[in-house]
Image: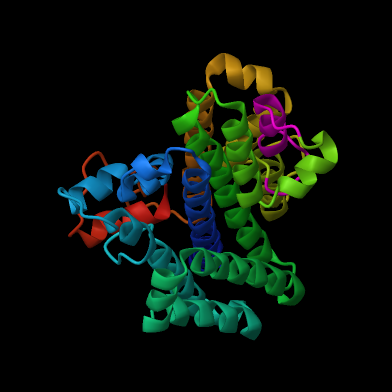
Amino acid sequence: MLSRVADHIYWMSRYIERAENIARLMQVSFELLLDSAGVGSVKNDDYWSPVLAATAMEASFRLLYPDPKPNDSFHFLTLDERNPDSILSCVREARENARTVRDQISDEMWAELNQLHLLVSSERGTAMLASSPQGFFEKIIQSSLLFDGITSATLSRNEGWNFLQLGRFLERADKTSRFLDIKTQTMANTDIAVDALEWGTILRACSALASYRRVNGTEFTLDRVLEHLLFSTEFPRSVRFCVKMADEMLHHISGTSTGRYSNRCEKLAGALLARLNFSGPSDVLTRGLHEYIDDLQVALNETGQAIFEAYVHLPQEPLRAALRPATFDPLSPHVQRQQQQQQ
C-alpha cells in the first residue's frame, strides 16, 4: 500500500473517532455540571472549561477569544471552523481524507461519513445544536458507531484495515485518558454523593457503566474506575485494551512476530503496553492521576509520531511536529494543519 494512502486511511479513522470523543467529552462536562449542587453559581462558559483543559485547547481558545462572551467556548468546541479540533473540523477532515482514498473504502462507509458531514455543516445541524445539544452530541456518537460497524462489515482485512484500526485505537486510548483528566478538575470535592454521580457520568459517557456494574456493582470508587478505564483487558475502550490492539495492528503491518520489534513505533507501543500490563491503580495514585495521564498522552503522541516516521515520512520532507507548537496563530493554515494531526 502507498504510504500516502495509508496515511489518509489512518487519519480518516482518527478524525471520526476524535469527533465522537469530543462529543462524549462535552456530554461529560454538561452532565457533571447539571448534577453538581452549585451549577447555578457557575458561569456558562465555565461549563466547558474542563473540556478545554483536558483536550489542550485552552490556550488556542484564549487567543481566538481574548474577551470571551457567553457560549463562545461552546461554539469553539463544536462548530468553529477556526478550531482545527472542533467537531465540525474533525468531521470535515475525516471526510476529506476519505474522499482522497475513495477507491480504498466501501460505498457504505463513504455514504455514512458524507451524511454526517452534511448534517454538521448545515443549518439543520446548527439548529439541532441550539435546541438540543445532547441530541446533537448523541447524533455524532451514533454516526461514528455506525461508521465503525459499517467498516467492520464491509472493509477487507488488508493493510488498509490495519491502518484504520491503528488510528482508531490510538485516538480512543488518548481520549479515554482525557475523560479521567476531566475528573481531576473536581478531585477536591468531598461530597460522596456528588463524587459517585461524577464517576457514574464519566463511565456512562465512555459506554462503560453497564460493564463496570457487572464487575463492581453499584459502588463507585476511584481505584475501581481506574482499573476499568485504564487497565481492563476486556473493556474495548480502556487504555490498556486500545494500546494492546494498536500494538497488534503494528505487528500485522510489519509482519514482525509478537514480542519483537522492527521499528521505533513498535518499540514505543510495546513499551507502553508493558507499562500498563505491570501497573495498577496504586501506581496511578502514587504518581498522581493528572501526572499519570500526562505521561500516557506523551507516550501516545510519541507513538503516533513514530508511526508517521516509519510509514509516511519521506527523507526529503520535514518531519511532522508531534506536539502542538509553542505559539498558536489562528490565521495560519500551516499551524492549523499541524494541530489537526496531533493532540
- Residue 294 vs 106, above or below: the answer is above
| Residue 120 drawn at (x, y percent) | 43, 75
Residue nearest the observer in this picture, 333 or 135: 135
Residue nearest the observer in this picture, 174 or 267: 174
Outermost residue, left direction? 67
Residue nearest the observer in this picture, 126 or 118: 126
The number of numbered discs placed on residues in the rendered structure image is 0
Left or right, residue 243 beside residue 121: right
| Residue 329 drawn at (x, y percent) | 19, 52
Left or right, residue 124 beside residue 222: left
Q: In which quarter of the image is residue 78?
A: bottom left
- Residue 189 vs 247, above or below: the answer is above
Please identify the quadrant where the N terminus is shown: bottom right
Outermost residue, right direction? 214
Outermost residue, top direction? 286
Residue nearest the observer in this picture, 209 or 13: 209
Image color mode: rainbow
The magenta span reads 219-237
In the image, what residue occupies the spot 49% across and 27% down? Answer: 290
Residue 92 visible in rendering: no
Q: Quadrant of residue 276?
A: top right
In the image, what residue occupies the spot 38% across and 66% down? Answer: 89
Q: Is residue 234 magenta?
A: yes
| Residue 333 drawn at (x, y percent) | 24, 62
Q: Is residue 197 magenta?
A: no
In the image, what residue occupies the spot 21% across and 42% down? Answer: 327
| Residue 296 drawn at (x, y percent) | 54, 33
Residue 100 visible in rendering: yes
